[in-house]
Structures are given as structure tokens and as C-alpha cells.
Image: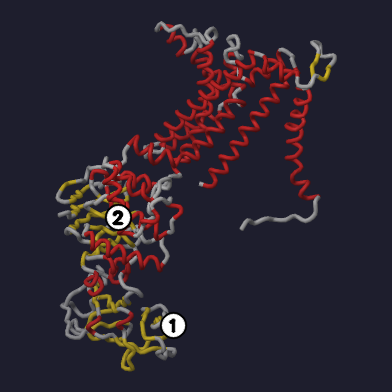
Amino acid sequence: MAGLKLDGLRKSFGSNEILKGVDLALADGEMLVIVGASGCGKSTLLRIVAGLETPTTGRVLIDGRDVTDLDPSARDIAMVFQNYALYPHMSVFENMAYGLKIRGLPRAEIRAKVDAASALLGLEALLERKPRQLSGGQRQRVAMGRAIVRDPKLFLFDEPLSNLDAKLRVQMRGEIRRLQRRLKVTSLYVTHDQVEAMTLGDRLLVMHKGVPVQLATPTEVFERPADTYVAGFIGSPAMNLLPGKLGRNGTMVTVAGADIDLGSRRFDRPDGFPVVLGIRPEHVLLDAAGTTWPVEVVELLGSEMLVHAGRPGEAALTVKIANGTPVSDAIRASFPAPHLHIFDQATGLRMEA
Amino acid sequence: MERRTLFPGRLLPALLILPQLVLTVVFFLWPAVQAIRSSLEREDAFGTSTEFVGLDNFTDLFADPLYLAAIGRTVVFCACVTAVSMGVALVLAVLADTEIRGRTFYRTMLIWPYAVAPAMAAVLWVLMFHPQIGLVGAWLNRIGIAWDYKLDGTQAMALVILAAAWKQISYNFIFFLAGLQAIPKTIIEAARIDGARGLRRFRTIVLPLLMPTVYFLLVVDLVYAAFDTFATVYAVNGGGPGQSTQTLVLKVYLDGVVNANVGSSSAQSVVLMAGVIVLCALQFRFLGRKAVT
């Protein structure tokens, strides 16, 4: 059982607080993806778990053992870096064998482990090559191989796919997922890419300015974002966030002069309470009975198109509709009640009826 | 693709390279040709007549045990200066590469010796190691070590090696530090996670990645020690005691200018010139190699 537990982690560089208290527990074999914009502290968090940075306060426990003050080498972890960090002067074989050699494993055992890992990753033919003779995807595989041969308690991934082109990224994403499922190693994966986060994680941790904002399954994060930040960050194109006011005893929101019915939901707040109404572009309906929005730009995505609408200086609305739908100077849009998210305008937090 | 600006005609390009050409001709080609010419001549003791003697000066030179001894001495001197200056610089660079408070100050201080004039550097070392008034020299004598670089040839050699090496440490330090900083941090971190520590990490990861810099400095330092240490060595002891610190460049000066044996001195210059050409060729090869990796 190799779980990971983070206990009140804080990290400051000088007066700059990067992590403002992170608590986290990973079950054995779980893959948790930490996602957030650059500068949110996600990489620092990973580096603290790796032992490359020391937390200002807080503890890191791997497998129930406090490793906060241990050297990276003593933590029994493996890490895949964004730039792969392969040793350029060593062959693929030597790159994978290096950690084992240092642990003093017998030659035959090293050979066997490296062979097994390279078979798993399809690297058999490349063992004698130097990293510079490899393509990006192959380097990525070697970096994975170097992590796998060590048979670690914990995998750490630091944006491992960012340096690959789009097509390869999708392919490697799938490979990483399959590999992780197969090896059942507890993994922490850091990315700024929300698609990677959604597809890879058993659970997601969304971070914003050093604070964990939401920890939940990808579905939960997508369907019930904890605040306006998560709502805008997860999902592409981003969720429409329209400022409005509650009305009619908390059963309706007034947005840009239009009254939008909340269906069966009723929010126990005074009328006029400032809220933010959220709705994903794909959930907005074109409806002759809806409110009128002047069209600014139409973008073609292939099978779908995006209509950017809104009144200058007022709320903007993005609508995702099937390609070929006729669009004139203005659209009439309605907001189906089941797909509406309501957030407190002052705190940004999700409100439940 | 390489971008080139093409100038029309011939006059402007010629004008543009003229200053460099003039300098090269006046300060290099002309003296070099003169040296080659006078290396084939012999002048009488009063400088009133010269005669052409072919390669006699060279055959005399390589039959002269004093010259052969000077070659051996120069090889030892170069090897020691290079080893000491590179070794110390590497240690300092590794230490300066760590995250420490005030490292900018520390680095600046380490670069300073490079700006000290060679003769001044020699004077500094003399003042430290003078057997009577030198801080270290007097102390050595007080604790019972017979230290006098003016009498003891080995001690004199050690002192000029130290003085010459010290001058070059700054230069090596800058290149080593730059080389160390060019190694991606994540590679070192990957090695840390792989469990490589201390000397082992340095030997198996850092040093191999630093090899291009090592090769480059090796050639530069050899050239420096062989040809660029005249002022330092001359200022310490003038090649003495006896001939114990007389390196090849010193011998060229002493034989030609002090002892007025122009023919032999010129022949020695030509031999040195050949040496410089060989080392420069090596240097270009390693520079090219550095650019590739």
C-alpha cells in the first residue's frame, strides 16, 4: 500500500507565498492530476513531494512514512520531467540503468529490468542510441522507462507532454494512462492542460494562486465547479459567466435585462442578491422565445461553430452550435434551467439551492 | 539559412578589412618574416656583419643541452600551471554554482585576478613569498623550512607555477562556471532522484557534460602557460636562479635581447611559432567540437 499524504503544506520564497496550505491524500494506485494556470503553485507542490524543494511548513508522507526531511533519493519516487532530463552523454540503456546501478543492483538484474521496461515501451531497438538521436516521443518513452525500472512507490509527472506536438500528445496521453493502470503505481501528475487533466486523472485537484480550489473526480469538477475560477478554467470553450441579480424569491436571475428562470431551484437569498450565472456554450439554446444578443463573430470549429455575441460594454455570450445553423446579425438565446450554475458574485463560490 | 550582406565592387570590402590587415602585417607577418630570415643568418659579436648559414642555427639549437633542458622545463611548467589553474578553478566554480547568499559578490571577487597585470601579480607573489619580508616566506623559515626561491631552483619553479596559475584561475573559473550553468537543472535533479550524490554525481553526470569546456580550457591554458607567462616569470626571478625557471619564451628574450645572439634567438622564435601554430590548430579543432555538442 503506497499512498501519499500531504499535511498542511506551505511554501514561501521570501515574502512571496506560493503554497498557502495544501492537504491531500492519495489512495494506493490512484492517479491524481493537479491542474492550474502557470504560477498557481502546482509545480512547486510536485517538487516538494519529490524532495527537490523543502516546504516552509507541513509534512509529506509516502506510504505512511514522514519523508519531509529526506533526500529525493531516499523517498523511493520516480519523476518524469517536462524536458525529459535524459542524461545526454548516456545511451538509452545507460539512462534507464543509471538509478539501478547506483543502488548497487547486480548487472544481470539491471539488464533484466531494463529489458522488461523497454519491451513495455517499445524501446528495444533504441537501447544503444543517445538521446539526441531520438524523436520527442521516443525521448518521452525513455523518460518513462527510467521511472518504471526503478519500481518506485510514487510516480511524479511534471507536465511531461508539453514539449510534444498535438498529435503525439494525444497518443502519449493514452500510453501514460494505460501504463499507469497496468502498473498500478500511485501517481501525481501536474499539468496546465485541462484536457490532459480530464482524461488522465482519477481525481483532479484544481489549484489557483497557491490554494486548492476543488478536489473531485473529473466529472464532478466539470458538472459542479466549486467556484467561478474552476468554472472558467475547466471546459473549452470556457463557461459563460454572466453577472446578474436574484429575483422572484430566489427562483429567477436577471441577466442583461432578461429574466432567466431557475426551474425547480430556489435560492434562499434576498431579491437583488448579486450572483454570477454560469452556462456552458454547448448548453445555450437558440430559441425564438429567448433573449436577443447581437452577434459579433462566428468561428468555425469543424462540425461545430462558435458564436460570440454580446452588447458592447455588457456581458458577452459564447454559444456552441452545429455547423450550418443559419446565423444572422443577432441570435435569440435561451438558458435551460438544468444547466445553470449559480455563483455568489462577492465570493465566487458555487451556491446550492 | 545564413544571412549575408553582399557589398558591390571591390573597393569598399577592401577598405573595410584594411585596418585589420595593416595590423596583422605590421605586428605579425613582418616580424615573423624577419624572425625567419634572421634565424637563417649569423651575426658577428659587434653586429657589423651578417652571413647566411642555412639551418645551422637550428641544428646548433637542438644539439644544445641547455635548450633541450629548457624544453623539458617548459613542458613541466605548462603541465603544472594548467593542472593547478584548472583544478582550483573547477573546485571554485563548483562551489560558486551552488545557491549561496552573496554569490554575485563572491563570483565578482573570483574574476578580479584576471584584471591584474602579470608583473603586478608576480610582485604580489614575491611579496608573499620573499624569504625575509614575505608573509608566507618568512613564516616558512621561522618554522624551520629553508625557503629561499632565490637560491633553490625547485622552490623558484614552484613559485612561478603558482603565480602563473593564479593569473589563469579567473579565466578558467568563468568558463567552468558558465559550463556548469549550461547544464540543465532538471538533469541534476533527475540524478538526485536516481540517488546519485556528491562526488559520484559529479563524476558520472556533471564532468562528462563539462568535457567540451575542459578540452577548450586545456588548450587555452597550455597556450597561455607556454607563451603568455613571460612577464610573470621574468618579474619573479628573471629565469633564475641559474636557469631553473628559464622557459622557452624567457630563453628567446635572454638569448636575443640580453645576450645579443640574434640568430639563435630567432631560430628559437621560429620553433615557438611552429608550436603556437600546432596548438592553435588543436584549439580550433576543439572549438569546432564545442560548437557541435
Answer left or right for B47 relative to A265.
right
**Residue on which disc 2 sits:** A117
Total tally of numbered discs in the picture: 2
Residue A75 image offset from top left, x and y in percent = 23, 46
Q: Residue at x 30, y 82 (%)?
A: A283
Classify 10 Å Cα crowding around label 2: few (below 14), some (14-19), many (20 and above).
many
**Residue on which disc 1 sits:** A298
Callout 1 secondary element: strand
Using the rendered image of the protein, determine whether residue A18 is visible from the camera's viewpoint: no
Answer left or right for B68 relative to B17.
left
Amino acid marked by disc 1:
Val
Chain identity of mark 1: A
Do tags 1 and 2 sit on the same chain? yes
Q: Nearer the viewer, residue B155 or A95?
A: A95
- Image quadrant where residue B203 sits: top left
- Up/down of B152 relative to A209, above or below: above
